[in-house]
Image: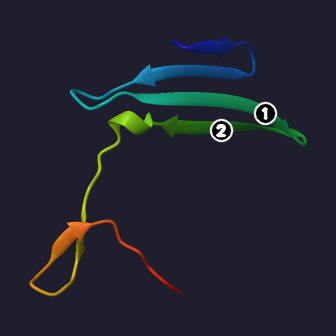
Amino acid sequence: MEDVAIAERLTFWWAVDDEPASRVELRIDAHGGSTRLRVVETRPLDVLDLIGVPLPGAGGANYGPALVAA
């Protein structure tokens, strides 16, 4: 448990098996005559998986960041 604000917010960390942990925030907000539950799951930047994108080019495919121009 990371943070608790009674009747407003609950924040905690969780993980499945050997996967990196995610931070989960459950937030309750009054919305007109009803209640809205917002769920936000995030992973810290230092544990995000970086995956190369195959880029076509001379000599075969290379992997790296992609730039797309409109």
Task: Identify the mark at residue 38; answer none if there is no mark.
Answer: 2
* Relative vertical location of residue 13 with respect to residue 64 in this rendering, above or below: above
Decide which of 17, 20 is in the foreground and name it. Answer: 20
* Relative vertical location of residue 3 with respect to residue 40 in this rendering, above or below: above
Counting other residues with Cα less than 10 Å from the Cα at mark 2, is it few (<14), some (14-19), or many (20 or more)? Answer: few
Separation (CA) of disc 1 from disc 2: 8 Å
Residue at x 73%, y 12% (from the top left corner): 6
Q: Determine whether, in the image, residue 56 is placed left or right of residue 48.
A: left
Residue at x 36%, y 72% (from the top left corner): 66
Q: Position of residue 36 (x, y in %)?
A: 74, 39
For the residues bearing labels 1 and 2, Cβ distance under 8 angstroms: yes
Image quarter for residue 49?
top left
Q: Look at label 2 and name its amino acid.
A: Arg
Q: Position of residue 40 (x, y in %)?
A: 57, 38
Q: Look at label 1 and name its amino acid.
A: Asp
Q: Position of residue 28 (x, y in %)?
A: 73, 30
Say which element carries label 1: strand
Q: Determine whether, in the image, residue 32 is placed left or right of residue 26.
A: right
Q: Determine whether, in the image, residue 18 is placed left or right of residue 65.
A: left
Image quarter for residue 15?
top left
Answer with mark 1 or mark 2, whichever residue precedes in sequence: 1
Say which element carries label 2: strand
Task: Identify the mark at residue 29; answer none if there is no mark.
Answer: 1
Residue at x 21%, y 83% (from the top left corner): 56
